Image (spheres, helix red, strand yellow):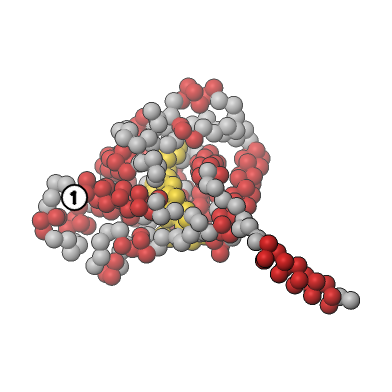
Amino acid sequence: MGCPVENDREERAMGQINLDDFRVREGHKVSLNKWPTDIPKVYSSKEQYRVMLKEHVGELSELQRIHYAHDRYAVLLIFQAMDAAGKDGVIRHVMSGINPQGCQVYSFKHPTLQELDHDFLWRANCALPERGRIGIFNRSYYEEVLVVRVHPEILRSRQIPEDLLNSDEIWNNRYCSINNMERHLYYSGTRIIKFFLHLSKKEQRKRFLRRIDEPEKNWKFSIADIEARKFWHRYMAVYEDCLSETSTEKAPWYVVPADDKKNARLIVSEIILNTFKSLNMSYPETSEERRQELLKIREMLAAEEE
């Protein structure tokens, strides 16, 4: 239920993507070792990959223009992953055709002092997209139930009341807060799609080595990356809990195999397209009164040429 079946995928024709293979069903208990990090390619060659991605980007660009003009929905894309899983690349390639006027990207770093004086969802709420726009969170409020859970000393350093800090329910309470907020956003017109780029530890090692060996990629590597790698199994455990507790019908998680960057980009773009197509969007209709006004203006402009 919601976990990819490898045999079914192998039988599928090249280029077809079944989005149900990647969606975490509400109430499903996630075991990430049962979700592959690598799957048969959905493209047959680099050229076909480029053609498929170009088609996805073009279609998404057109839908984004309608979305902006329709001005009824907001779309929020959330990307979470271990280091080197390809979040930046997915965002850069998939959203390359989007008009910047209708899109905003936030990369959540260490909270500021002002942000720490508010609840853990406050800074994310300040960055939510308005209607007609696409918001992209490169990491998000989910860090507060992921990295903070792996490193509880972070939580202890914040100004949280002692009785809440020591509560056994603190993580369940945070899951509840997240689910309630996302449900509220859904019923306010925001559609949320959450992606976990599922990278293997072996592939992460390869990418880290490339970042060290290739000078132009040195800037991407940080000692903090290798420190986080030491907690790999702990991170997988907290991701499993997070995905299990916060994937809902209204705000689903998608576990996207990320060992093949091209595959991941095509899968993500297809999921985003599917969401946009599910919305009842159209360009605003012109009233008869407005149409007559435009025709008069047209006559005036045409007369200037004579």
Instruction: Say left or right for 206 vs 62.
Output: left
Instruction: Say left or right for 10 vs 108.
Output: right
Q: Which is more toward the observer, 42 or 226?
A: 42
Question: Badge 1: few (under 14), some or many (20 or more) residues near its Cα, within 10 Å?
Answer: few
Q: Residue at x 70, y 64 (%)?
A: 291
| Mark 1, residue position | 170
Can residue 55 be seen in this snapshot? Answer: yes
Instruction: Say left or right for 210 vs 166.
Output: right
Give the amino acid at mark 1.
Answer: Ile
Residue 301, image x, y percentages: 79, 74
Q: Quadrant of the N terminus?
A: top left
Q: Residue at x 83, y 77 (%)?
A: 304
Q: Residue at x 44, y 47 (%)?
A: 193
Can residue 230 be seen in this snapshot? Answer: no
Residue 112, image x, y percentages: 30, 68
The outermost residue toward the front is: 289
Q: Which secondary structure lies at badge 1? A: helix
